[in-house]
Amino acid sequence: MRAVRLPAFAKINLCLDIIGKRPDGYHELRTIFQTISLHDRLVLHPAQKSGIELIVRGNATLEREPVEQNLVYRAVAVLRRDLKIRSGVRIELDKRIPSGRGLGGGSSDAASALIGYLRFINRKIPTQRLLEIAAGLGADVPFFLFGGRALGVNRGDEIYPLPEGRRAAVLLISPQEIAVPTEDAYRWVARRLTKPRTPSKLWRFCALCWSPQEFGVSNDFETAVFGRYPRLAAIKRTLLQRGVAEAALAGSGSAVFGIFRNPAYARRAARWFPKDQTFVCETLSRERYRRAMGLRGRL
């Protein structure tokens, strides 16, 4: 077996509507995912010992956690059980996507681990089974099997491809002192779920799904999260006041993103936030995502 190398790309939610609480305890979502070029990197090596060895770099918290809790380890463990694989694998995970910022880094790592391990052992499984495994690891994981621009419904784990928007530069602002656990964000927003969803918002969401021309970003987490972290509201306000057409909270936060027509404007805007971690990247179409992940003919 040869080493397999592949990226694990981040995402933003161009639109995120929380419809209500489901009978199973999860939340019903309507969201538009968009992959972006910021990425972690995974390398899978043959190992002499059986089992899974996982080495994490670039994130002190994840480096200290038991590897069995990491989604990369769990993803590969499920495939090994399904396929009855005994040979060992050593996985190196280099983190660049900041955790607790709503960028889907852990979910993307899990999807890349699934794709990469199947390539590593030169095996295929039915797409339906792969999607079941991905959904069992996390609601966002199925999206990262495909990338690009996609509609997510139910828990966000039922994925439908959408027309690709124009390529755009994206500035991510990640306040280093603020991380928002997803569970907390859902709890904070829960008190607002009793309010009826207006028909106009539903039609706006439908229009956005089919429009490749405009992003029209929005995020139902913003009111609750901004109320607890005014600094995040101030970041978005700064972006909008200085002429950025679109800006929003990334997922459940704490990163905030702005969308620009070219990367030069995004790089200049990054100077407005000298105390924060910033990333200038771009939207990634489904075709570019599939090429980068080596997915042609595999899914």
Image (spheres, grey):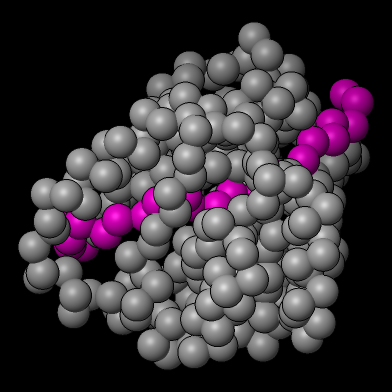
Residue 175 is situated, as x and y percent measured from the top left of the image, at 67, 80
The answer to whether residue 146 is seen in the rendering is no
Residue 58 is situated, as x and y percent measured from the top left of the image, at 83, 67
Q: Quadrant of the N terminus?
A: top right
Q: Quadrant of residue 284?
A: top right
Q: How many numbered marks appear?
A: 0
Depth check: 99 or 123 in front?
99
Q: Quadrant of residue 145?
A: top right
Task: Identify the residue shown where x is 50% and y is 64%.
Answer: 248
From what the image shows, is residue 39 above or below residue 171?
Answer: above
Task: Identify the residue shown where x is 39% and y is 88%.
Answer: 227
- Secondary structure mostly seen in the magenta stretch: strand
Residue 291 is situated, as x and y percent measured from the top left of the image, at 74, 22
Q: Residue furthest top?
A: 297
The region drawn magenta spans 1-25
Residue 240 is situated, as x and y percent measured from the top left of the image, at 55, 69
Depth check: 228 or 1 in front?
228
Q: Quadrant of the C terminus?
A: top right
From what the image shows, is residue 277 above or below residue 118?
Answer: below
Q: Is residue 223 left or right of residue 104?
A: left
Taking the magenta stretch, the answer to whether it contains residue 9 is: yes
From what the image shows, is residue 160 above or below residue 251?
Answer: above
Q: Is residue 139 left or right of residue 124?
A: left
Task: Identify the residue shown where x is 53% and y is 28%.
Answer: 164
Taking the magenta stretch, the answer to whether it contains residue 179 is: no
The answer to whether residue 195 is seen in the rendering is yes
Task: Identify the residue shown where x is 48% and y is 17%.
Answer: 126
